Amino acid sequence: MILYYIHDPMCSWCWGFESCKQALFEKLPADITVKYLLGGLASDTNEVMPDAMQQMLQQTWKNIEQRIPGKKFNFDFWTSNNPIRSTYPACRAVIAARKQNRSHEMIHTIQQAYYQRAMNPSHNDVLINLADELDMNVVAFRKDLVSTETQQQLEAEIFQAHDLNVDSFPALVLDFNRSHRRIPVDYINPTPMFDLINNLTES
């Protein structure tokens, strides 16, 4: 059985889900394999976000802070950067890090950089610096970050997410008995998700 986790490293609700997600994954039985899929929230662009989009995303951050206890954002990001609506570079960084078995660390580091350190992971130079902070092979990472193979892998994962009927993140999809079942995301309590997965797999 496979539990697909469809996400984007620059998805603010994915950042909000992080603690509850980890608690859920730690409780899962050994016969369920967790597979991460990159959904690709926003395609490549160099254009600065329109003011209306910046305001909308800042409001989303505030909504997450209000909904999820203890989750805080660094709003300095919006005044210290020229925000770009592009998450594909960060997605490719996760794939590049995966080649060094460091994808989970890269996801966490991108989230910390974006939401806590007011850095902009839409830029390759920021992502390369994060790889350096993680003591990765930066030469290999830099090459893999912009390779055709990495782009093709991202496109394949986005296609698979669409094939699972996922168009918003984060999302959980359980693959069992040759069928797919969407598991509603709970940002506060892992127990309802765990119980549903248990009930489905034991029925």
Image (tube, rainbow, N blue to C red):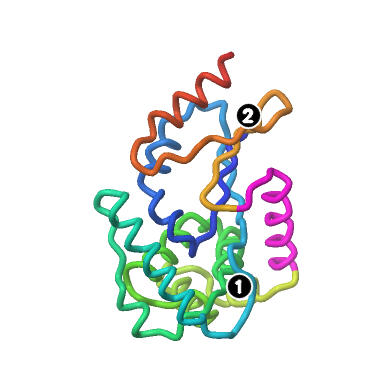
Residue lying farthest top? Answer: 203
The residue nearer to you, when weighing 16 against 146, is 16
Amino acid residing under circle 1:
Ala
At mark 2, the secondary structure is: loop
Mark nearer the N terminus (1 vs 2): 2
Q: CA distance from mark 1 to mark 2?
A: 33 Å
**Which residue corresponds to mark 2?**
1
Look at the picture and state if 178 lies above or below 6. Answer: above
Residue found at the very far front of the displayed protein: 52
Q: What's the residue at 54%, 53% (across, down)?
A: 7
Q: Nearer the viewer, mark 1 or mark 2?
A: 2
- Figure quadrant of the C terminus: top right
Q: Main secondary structure of the magenta part?
A: helix
Residue 115 x %, y %: 36, 67
Above or below, 181 against 118 in this view is above
Q: Residue shown at 70%/50% (left/top)?
A: 162
Q: Amino acid at mark 2?
A: Met
Q: Judging from the image, what secondary structure is the residue with disc 1 in?
A: helix
Q: Which mark is residue 140?
A: 1
Asked where in the image residue 4 lies, by quadrant, the reply is: top right
Residue 163 is one of the magenta-drawn residues: yes
Badge 2 local density, few (<14 within 10 Å), some, or many (20+)? some
Q: Is residue 28 above or below residue 84?
A: above
Specify the quadrant that holds the N terminus. top right
Q: Residue at x 37, y 38 (%)?
A: 23
What residue is shown at x 63% (from left), y 48% (from top)? 166
Residue extent of the magenta highlight: 149-167
